[in-house]
Amino acid sequence: MRIGELAERAGTTAKTLRFYEEQGLLPPAERTPSGYRDYAPETAARIDFVHRGQAAGLTLAQIRQILDIRDDGAAPCEHVRDLLDARLAEIEQQIAQLAALRDTITELRRDAAQPDPDSCSADQVCRYL
Amino acid sequence: MRIGELAERAGTTAKTLRFYEEQGLLPPAERTPSGYRDYAPETAARIDFVHRGQAAGLTLAQIRQILDIRDDGAAPCEHVRDLLDARLAEIEQQIAQLAALRDTITELRRDAAQPDPDSCSADQVCRYL
DNA sequence: CTGGACCTTCCAGTGCAGGGGAAGGTCAAG
DNA sequence: CTTGACCTTCCCCTGCACTGGAAGGTCCAG
């Protein structure tokens, strides 16, 4: 199977698949005599896994770690759990930061509800910020 | 005042101030005969404004818009309100997306709580993802 | 007059996940 | 035989806000 067909099957682009190979997410593809990449159908499952990892908020580098463990013949379950735990902690923190920012902006916005241009001195640029 | 002193007063670096000038956040600085940038003390207030804008989650490009309005002699209050509203909407959306991702990962993580390496087939890489 | 602290410009890189497009090779249909 | 679709490698670009470093100029104290 050539790269375009695999890309379509996996719901991505040829460009992205070459990028994945370069990043070590896909093993160097077999080549036809003329140099075209030639993929086994199972490769689609690997790309699906990459997509599932992305949907779980993992970076390509993290997904690659999992694939490397699998390619070594081991089960990556434990590492997957650690990554999910770490990602979860990050997300909680991001949510907390965004919530704090939301509160800050909400307050600023409330103060700015009744604009009074004259009370904004030029040297502080805008008194609502 | 030279760039290093201003940077220290404003709690940033000389490098960053040159970058701000390049990005149009600071007007081109006066120069001493030898070519050093020479700042009026009021410049610190402008940098403080940039910091307040960043604390409100605005991008430098957005902060620049506000400064440009102010530099045109107008009061940027209205534009500030619009920017805050837009930022607020973005943040709400980001929080919602992160919350959804958190739920997804929490579920994945729960399934992965009792790892069973043998049930992970190599072709799906990891059955928990 | 020398050393060190400061300044100048310019180029390049960071992280993330690709996308754009050039220049050229290959393959099957008409 | 040519056209068009597909493939190859290559390098640069995106957004965001800086940061690092090289090569050289300036200024002040000792």
Image (cartoon, coloured by chain):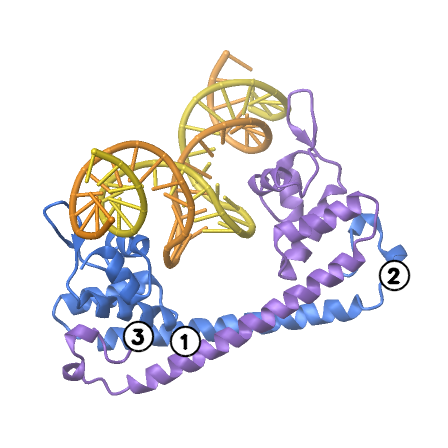
Chain colours: A blue, B purple, C orange, D yellow
Q: In the rendered view, tell whether residue B118 sits above or below residue B5.
A: below
Between marks 2 and 3 in the image, the one whose residue lies nearer the viewer: 2
Residue under numbered circle 2: A116
| Residue, disc 3 | A82
Q: Mark 1 falls on what kind of element?
A: helix
- Residue situated in front as seen by the camera: D29 or B70: B70
Residue C26 lies left or right of residue A59; in this view the side is left
Residues at circles 2 and 3 in contact by the CB criterion of under 8 Å: no
Q: Is residue B69 above or below residue B83?
A: above
- Mark 3, chain letter? A
Q: Indicate the chain on which mark 1 is placed.
A: A
Find the distance from the CA under tag 3 to the CA under tag 1: 10 Å
Q: CA distance from mark 2 to mark 3?
A: 53 Å
Q: Which mark is residue A88?
A: 1
Determine the image quadrant of residue A14: bottom left
Q: Amino acid at mark 1?
A: Leu
Give the image location of residue A65, x and y in percent: 25, 64
Report the side of A67 relative to B18 (left or right).
Answer: left
Residue A10 in the image, given as x and y percentages of width and height: 28, 66
Regarding mark 2 in the picture, which secondary structure is present there?
A: loop
Q: Residues within 10 Å of mark 1 (few under 14, many from 20)?
A: many
Q: Are marks 2 and 3 on the same chain?
A: yes
* Outermost left residue: A33
Which residue is found at the position 79% from the left and 54% from the top?
B76
